[in-house]
Structures are given as structure tokens and as C-alpha cells.
Amino acid sequence: MNRIFKESNGFAAAVFIASLLSLFHDSVFADECPSQDFAQFLPAFSANTEVQERLTAMTVKSLVLKPAGEQGAFEPQTTRVNSSTLVFPLMAPIAPDKTEGVEVEAVDGSHFNVVDKRAGNSYIKIFNFSRQTCWVLEGVEDWSINEKDLVGASTATMSIAENFCYQRARTYGRLGGLDKYSLTGEFFEAALENYVCAAASGDPQASLNAASLSLSGMASQLETDKVETLFKVAATTLASGASALSTFYCYGNDTDPDGPCQHPEEAERELIRAASMSSPDAMNKLGDTFETGRLVTKDMSRAMYCYRLAASKGNAIALNNLTRLKSQAAEVTEASHCY
């Protein structure tokens, strides 16, 4: 009887101890995992450096932009790094409700990406989380460009800061043009912002790139006056800038131009300027306007000469136009000048 009583007491004690251990384990686990609900987990993770360190995987997939190939080109490179090499905190606090500049993307029930744009389109980071016993940070994508990898004086007319902007703009424009990353839209926005920064130097190419990207539909549109100013700067030395300004005078900020030219005199003047800079494309385009009279001047003889001049510089379309016009208007005497 005593033996049975002792065994019963021993069993009860074991159950009691197991219950205590279970409660202790649950308490510890609750402390270790802020929440199984990612919407509640993220604010707790982001607000506490110790939690970030504890719930970051020992080996983290790290993506960074690095120089590659031709000078000035950058490509994303992915490696695996030990979490001990990371600098915590990895992210700034994120509020339980919507935080401006932060997007949470559900990949599936066990994976979330947190896209942090708070530092701007040139400094986006994406944090990759997966569900294990708790949510764990397993990857960090840093889409910024380290200034140490940029060239301080790639364009002589720009300051160091403007040079950095120009190089960033070219990189993000290339990345956006690949159309294979989830941040394609943000890359084009970053390119525009950085081209505008570089254009503050008065550089014609940066100005042309900024204005053209603004009208491309791939990035936000700048104000009409700003676009005109940029094109005017570009037109001072670039034939493509003068030609673009000519089109702008016709259609302004309209990304889907149609109908008659709004300012034909200004448009023709800039197109003549572009042709005078020895641009075969501008010469051919000027020939077309002289042939059709769609701007101001209608002059078949000058059109023929413009086509011939452009064709002599290798413009195949101009050669076809010249052949066509000669067959249609054999009686026209070719002028001695185009512009």
C-alpha cells in the first residue's frame, strides 16, 4: 500500500514538474517571439535592437550594388554573411499602423518582405522574413550605392556631389530599363531625382536626361517650366537637346502628343539649330517639315537638300525620302542650303 502511495505521489510530482516546465517554456518562448502574427511582430522587432539581434538568422543573405563591367556600371551581388558582421539596429522603428515609406509584402503565409523607402528612392532596403519557430530575418537587400564606389570627378563641370548624383542616375536608369526587378518604378524615380540633382550644375547631358525621363512616362512628370528650362540648357550644345526642345515647343508636357504644333515658330527654330549641329536625324526631320509645311516653312527644294545632306551622313530614312521626293517632284530644283 505504501509503495502504491509513493508511486502515486511520484507520478503526481512528475506531472506537476512537467507542468511547471511547460509554463516556464511557454513564458520564455513568449518573451523570445513577440508575436506569430507578422503585423504585430514587425513593430516589436523594429523597435528593439536586442530583438533584432536575437531574431536575425546566423547567416543572412545580403544583396548590395557593386561596380561591374564597364566603368560606372553597377550590378546587384548576393552573398551570405554572418549576422555578427551586421551593424544593429538594421531598421528604424515601424509603427503598428501604416508607416509612410514602408511597404509590407506577403510572399506567402511564411514569408514577408518589408520594403523601406523612408530614406528615399536612392536608399531603399528590403528585409526578407521567414516563419520558423518565430519570424526570423533571413535576408537584407540594400539597393543604395556606396559613395566609396563612385568616382569623384567623372564629369569636370560638376561638383563631387553632382557627379555622384549623375552616376547614381545612370545606374538606376539602367536597372529600371532591365525591367526585371520589383523596384523598377522606384529605380526610374531615383534616376530622375539624381539627374535633376546633376542638372543643377548646368550640364547639358544631365539636363537632357532629366527632361526626357520626365516625359517618358516611366517616372514622375516635372513641372512644365522646369522641363522647358532643362531642354533649353540641353539645346545649347547638344543637337538631340535642340531637337527635343523643338518637340517640346509643339506638345509641351503631353506624353501622348497629337494634333497641330502649339508653337511652330519656336519649334522650327530649334530644329534648324539641331540640324546646324550636324545631326543627320535633325536634318531628315527638318526636311520632312519643309516638305509637309507642318511647322512654318514649306519649301520642297530645301526639303530635298536636307534629305540629301542627311543621307550623305548615313541616314537611311533620309535616303529613302530623297528618292521618293525626287520621283514625285522631278521638276523641283534642289536648293543650295538646308538651314
Image: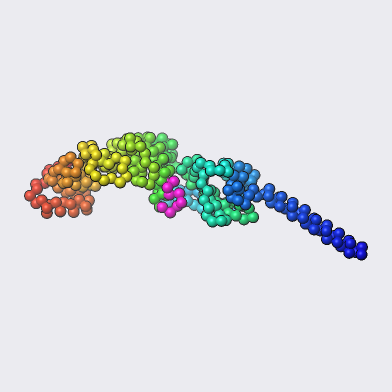
On the question of residue 292 being in view, the answer is yes
- What span is in magenta? 179-187
Please provide percent x and percent y for residue 124: 49, 45
Q: Residue drawn at (16%, 51%), measured in percent from left and top?
A: 322
- In the rendered view, would you say 183 is above or below 211? below
Please provide percent x and percent y for residue 302: 14, 44
Instruction: Tell me if residue 198 is in the magenta stretch.
Output: no
Q: How many discs mark residues in the rendered view? A: 0
Q: Residue drawn at (43%, 40%), measured in percent from left and top?
A: 164
Q: Residue drawn at (28%, 38%), measured in percent from left and top?
A: 235
Q: 300 or 239: which is nearer to us? A: 300
Report whether 286 appears left or right of 125.
left
Image quadrant holding the C terminus, namely top left
Report whether 203 appears left or right of 328.
right
- In the rendered view, would you say 322 is above or below 93? below
Q: 4 or 271: which is nearer to us? A: 4
Residue occupying the far right of the picture: 2
Report whether 113 appears left or right of 132.
left
Please provide percent x and percent y for residue 245: 28, 40
On the question of residue 205 being in view, the answer is no
Q: Residue drawn at (43%, 36%), measured in percent from left and top?
A: 161
Image quadrant holding the N terminus, namely bottom right
